[in-house]
Image (spheres, rainbow, N blue to C red):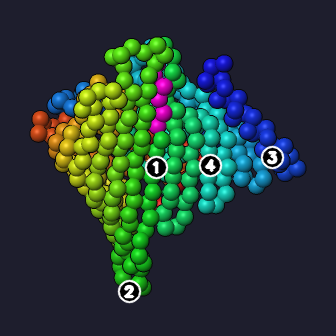
């Protein structure tokens, strides 16, 4: 029996068992449709990242049932990508099939589901833009606890089945954010302010193929970003500014090799500013070479942006959101990547559609 077949049969068995206990409760038909179009054109220095253009449209329809007043949900669907310029239509797709238990403040999801259900930000130093475009489906589980002062999230994503050609692989991730102290919200103040602390990261296990020879080694990769921050929000203009600072640490080990361990660490600072439809994000990294085993492993167990291999790196995002309502969001912007080697910049456009009877919503902190 293949791994994917066994995986979906396990999900279906879990749902059947839950249905037996909830048979007396009313069932409700659920559906949703997600779509995302993206255009990402890079130009300039390609020392740390190959300059390319990425563009396409991903469509993810889902349909299923819920019962027990929405606490239990079983959804199935398909996530397909049509890349612009190809003669054929949707040439890359993945089944979506999952069970979800949801009751405030807990959510548990098991199966094959979209990565956008995660609460954590997992910025470019954790997951690059291309991962978001081409690997948006998770196969595993996620546990989430969210409330007005923060959230906790842990997930497991199986990314590879062991075979004669492919390695066994999985990712285990964590994201935590918590507001500390009292919010500055006195009636005379025109500005609200709050401190927060948090951490995000993941462990990636990159194992062997069947019948692997001595040249192949198991690889362990751990990356973590603990941080502290402060957010200010104006009651008058609805503008906000958030400042974060922390460390970016990784443990990188190639088993069976002499001096096969690396532990780069550096400073990571971030500023996020929003005013009406405009947003600005600045991320600055300085320190040890992240992803020390090189770009050959980018997209394998290195899912973060390859620019963090540089000893110093600045990324600046400037975006304008020209459509924003309950169902559709669209924005255009430019991204500047600066290292000692030079400048690489991107022109970006994205359009996101999210409609249906059940839509995953994140809390705003």
Distance from the alpha carbon under mark 3 to that under mark 1:
33 Å
In terms of sequence position, does the residue under pointer 2 or pointer 3 come before the other? 3
Q: In which quarter of the image is the C terminus?
A: bottom left
3 to the left or right of 328: right
Q: In this view, does 22 lie above or below 341?
A: below
Residue located beneath label 3 in the image: 27
Q: Residue under circle 1?
A: 174
Q: SS of the residue at dot 3?
A: strand
Estimate the x, y position of residue 243 in percent, counting from the top left: 29, 62
Mark 4 or 3, closer to the camera: 4
Q: Is residue 339 visible?
A: yes
Q: Which callout, 1 or 2, points to the residue nearer the camera? A: 1
Of helix, strand and loop, which one carries label 4? strand
How would you rate the neighbour count of disc 1 (Cα within 10 Å): few for under 14, some for 14-19, many for 20 or more? some
Residue pictured at 78% horizontal, 44% vertical: 18
Q: Which is nearer the N-term, disc 1 or disc 2?
A: 1
Which tag, 3 or 1, sits closer to the chain's start? 3
Q: Which residue is drawn at 20% across and 43% down?
A: 288
Q: Which of marks 2 and 4 is nearer the N terminus?
A: 4
Pointer 4: what residue? 108
**Seen in the image, is 60 located left or right of residue 351?**
right
Q: Which residue position holds label 2?
A: 188
Give the mark, 4 or 1, whose residue is nearer the N terminus: 4
């Amino acid at each position: 029996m293949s791994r994917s077949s066994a995986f979906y049969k396990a999900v279906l068995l879990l749902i059947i068992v839950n249905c037996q206990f909830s048979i007396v409760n009313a069932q409700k038909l659920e559906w949703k449709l997600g779509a995302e179009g993206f255009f990402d054109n890079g130009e300039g220095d390609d020392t740390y990242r190959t300059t390319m253009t990425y563009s396409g449209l991903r469509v993810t329809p889902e349909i299923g049932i819920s019962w027990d007043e929405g606490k239990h949900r079983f959804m199935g669907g398909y996530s397909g990508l049509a890349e612009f310029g190809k003669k054929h239509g949707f040439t890359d797709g993945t089944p979506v099939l999952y069970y979800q238990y949801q009751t405030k403040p807990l959510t548990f999801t098991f199966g094959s589901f979209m990565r956008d259900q995660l609460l954590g930000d997992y910025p470019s130093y954790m997951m690059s833009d291309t991962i978001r475009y081409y690997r948006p489906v998770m196969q595993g589980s996620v546990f989430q606890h969210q409330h007005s002062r923060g959230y906790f999230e842990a997930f497991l994503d199986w990314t590879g089945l062991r075979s004669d050609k492919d390695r066994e692989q999985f990712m285990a991730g964590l994201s935590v954010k918590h507001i500390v102290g009292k919010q500055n919200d006195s009636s005379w103040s025109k500005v609200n302010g709050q401190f927060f602390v948090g951490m995000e990261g993941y462990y990636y296990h990159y194992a062997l193929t069947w019948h692997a020879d001595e040249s192949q080694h198991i690889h362990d990769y751990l990356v973590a970003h603990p941080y502290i921050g402060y957010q200010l929000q104006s009651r008058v203009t609805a503008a906000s500014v958030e400042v974060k600072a922390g460390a970016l640490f990784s443990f990188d080990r190639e088993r069976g090799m002499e001096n096969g361990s690396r532990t780069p660490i550096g400073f990571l600072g971030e500023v996020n500013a929003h005013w009406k439809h405009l947003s600005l994000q600045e991320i600055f990294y300085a320190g040890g070479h992240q992803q020390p085993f090189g770009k050959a492993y980018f997209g394998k167990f290195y899912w973060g942006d390859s620019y963090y291999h540089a000893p110093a790196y600045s990324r600046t995002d400037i975006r304008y959101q020209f459509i924003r309502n309950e169902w559709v969001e669209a924005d255009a912007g430019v991204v500047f990547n600066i290292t000692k080697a030079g400048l690489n910049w991107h022109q970006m456009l994205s359009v996101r559609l999210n409609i249906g009877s059940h839509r995953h919503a994140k809390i705003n902190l």
